[in-house]
Image (cartoon, coloured by chain):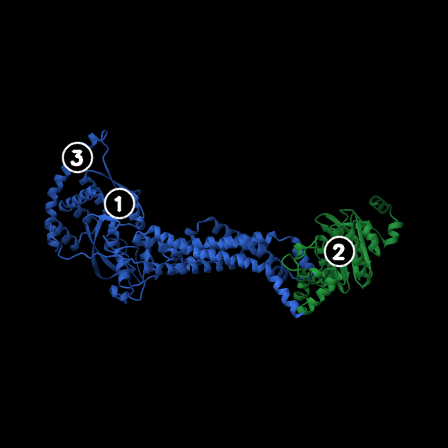
Amino acid sequence: MSRPAGEDACAPKKMHRKTFKAAVTLSILIICALPIHAQQTLRWGADPSGGAPYVYTDPANPENYIGYEKEMVDALAQAMGRRAEFVPSDWETLVSALQRNSFDVIVNGLEPTGDRAQQIAFSNPYYVFQLQLTVRRDDDRIHSIDDCKKRIVGTLGNTAASRILQQQGIPFRSYQDPVGAYRDLELKRIDAVVMDVPAEAFYARDNPKLKQAGSPFSRGTYVIGLRKGDDALKADVDKAIEKIITDGTLERILTKWKLWNDAQVEFQNSVKTKTAPTVPFEMTNSSFNWGEALMRLTRAALVTVSLALGSMIIAVTLGLPLAVGQWNGPRWLKVICTVYVEFFRGTPVLVQLLFLYFGLPMVTGIGMPGWLTALVGLGLNYAAYESQVYRAALEAIPKGQWEASYSLGMSPLLAFRRIILPQAFRIALPPMTNDFVSLFKDTSVAFAISVWELATAYRELANASGQFLLLGVIVSLFYLAMSLPMARLAGMLEKRLSNRSIERVDEAEVTA
Amino acid sequence: MIKVENLRKRFGSNEVLKGINFEVPPQTILGVIGASGSGKTTLLRCMNGLETITEGSVTCVDVKLQGGQSPAEYKRCVRDLRLKVGTVFQHFYLFPHLSVVGNVIEAPVHVLKTPKKTAVAEAYELLESVGMKHAARRYPESLSGGEQQRVAIARALAMHPALLLLDEPTSALDPRRIATLRGLLRGFAEKGHTMIIISHSIGFLGGVSDNLLYMEGGHVVEHGPTEQVLNAPKDPRVKEFISQAE
């Protein structure tokens, strides 16, 4: 199959010269016409973060974007007589951004799916992709996707790969970009990664710690996404795709990016000869149904609650020694506590989480799982805030309370425990409740490290279904259903605390 | 009962107490009188260990707190001293998170390890003796100044102190309540309590104390039976203070 590719390659060369001439003529015409008619733009959206080799920031020149799709869009635009303009965007929200008219087309290795077809229109395909399974080099358990039934597989969210994994019932974790997935594979947070071959080739193939497991599988196509009803543009784009395939421009670009392979030869031949491809391309459908969505949201809500509770326990426990150390400790301890507090209050919790998740393993070589990282990270962060609440409360207790306790013969520890702390706790409780509610909402930053909590769930489900509004309402209800009882619980606790001493004495009275 | 010998207290280079000597016999009330800044509050704070003694000593029953003791020894002595000396502060400092009876039983239960049942029974007796039994289950914030003071007296007495210190007990009271307090304290003295009352109200101290001690500039200027100090002071400064007060 590789021979025809070589033969074909000669023909487009001649054609290329023609196009080149045409292009030069066209450019001259355009330059002459420029002052009168500005050239129409083709605004295209894609996610450049971790987006190699599709489109990504040029490491040599960070002002610039490069990638095979970047070059392809430039060629397409040229064929359409337009000027390509790249609009950096976010993979998960590409479809909604297109609908909001942020750009004219999506060119980002987009696969046609049934659910996307309900929201946007597709061009004809321009590339045939396959999936590649990658494992750690020393792993001899996994040879194909079928060996992954009870392991966790990483992949990009809302892609053909993630849908295939979902359909086969393989537990998987969604990532925002390939870098994170392959790094977690190295760190043993997951056991395998399934990725489109272009990304796999760029990010994993040369990594000595990883290896390919089995050969590429499951063919699918990349298409360009357009707004529904943009028929004229679709016709133009389809024509341009056919043009850059038949004149060899695309082949040259793909060859340059080492993406030219048998699958492309077969596909491009079918385009050139206007025949159906011999191997049909699989089209994945996301199996979105409301029952499952609600179940996944409930699971995510449980993760959110556990995260919030766990972090708050850490924060409340660690906050007290911090507060006491900063308030009444020896000088060196005061310095340590102050540095801790200022560090955690002065830097964004998102940065702290990313550091714990990605940075720390580079130092220690041990990677904590995402949920634990989120739990510890949020706990450490909020401990800084809780310590300040405690400290303010402790400082608000008049000195006379200490002196009265001492003159009744109490030791400092007893006075602290019996007299100062209960009063301080009462002062601290309302701000602590506030902090807890805000911690509860802050758990959503855990989406940055692929923890499947409520905000992540919303984002992924809404992107898969396009139901931003309805799912948004449901997710908000979930949050409210959890935070309102919490506020009520805190209110009851406050009330109970102020009654506790009465009850205690009442008991004593009965026995007296 | 309590003996203060050559007591000196310095804050940096500022000497506030310049060698105080006196003794309080059991079951008597000593009134300490003097203008603001005479050092009487510092004297009280030295007698319950809230200020460290620079020099000299305070002896209460068998506990001797001395300037120049090793920190560990001093700490132990302060703790023992505080079990012998009860204090009623000018601003009372009741524990706001505890009820009236809770305030009274707190130290007996957690410091003396008195069984709660015994402590509560005793607390009710004490509250009755200060006329506060009816408010036993109320919280300090709902009490008037005079009521808070009486709870503070009951709280201090619950520890069975050998000596009771009262700092400016009349400052928060109206004249009628002052008369009630005088009767209350005299009653306690007759029941065998020993007290030191710090005040700048000659009228109050004249009616309640057995002996008077006049302080000025960190010195004891005059110390003697109340009658004698009030009616025939030896020192002209005392005479002047009394005449100004009247």
Tell me, by letter, which chain the rendering colours green: B
Distance of mark 3 from mark 1, alpha carbons? 24 Å
- The picture places residue A97, in percent across and down from the top left corner, at 30, 46
Task: State which mark lies toward you, 3 or 2.
Answer: 2
- Tag 2 secondary structure: strand
On the image, the x and y values in percent for residue A128 come to 19, 53
Q: Residues within 10 Å of mark 3 (few under 14, many from 20)?
A: some
The residue under label 2 is: B166
Which quarter of the picture shows residue A85?
top left
Amino acid on which disc 3 is placed? Leu
Q: Does A62 sit left or right of A429 as displayed?
A: left
- Secondary structure state at the residue bearing disc 3: helix
Q: Of label 3 and label 1, which has the lower sequence position?
A: 3
Instruction: Tell me the mark number nearer the camera, choosing from 3 and 1.
Output: 3
Residue B142 screen position, x and y as percent: 66, 55
Whether residue A85 sits left or right of residue B91 in the image: it is left
Shade representing chain A: blue
Can you tell which of label 2 and label 1 is closer to the viewer?
2
Does residue B30 appear in the picture of this structure?
yes
Disc 3: which residue: A26
Q: Amino acid at mark 1?
A: Ile
Quadrant position of the C terminus of chain B in the picture: top right
**Residue behind mark 1:** A66
Would you call the spot at circle 2 few (<14 residues within 10 Å), some (14-19), or many (20 or more)? many
Image quarter where the N terminus of chain B lies is: bottom right
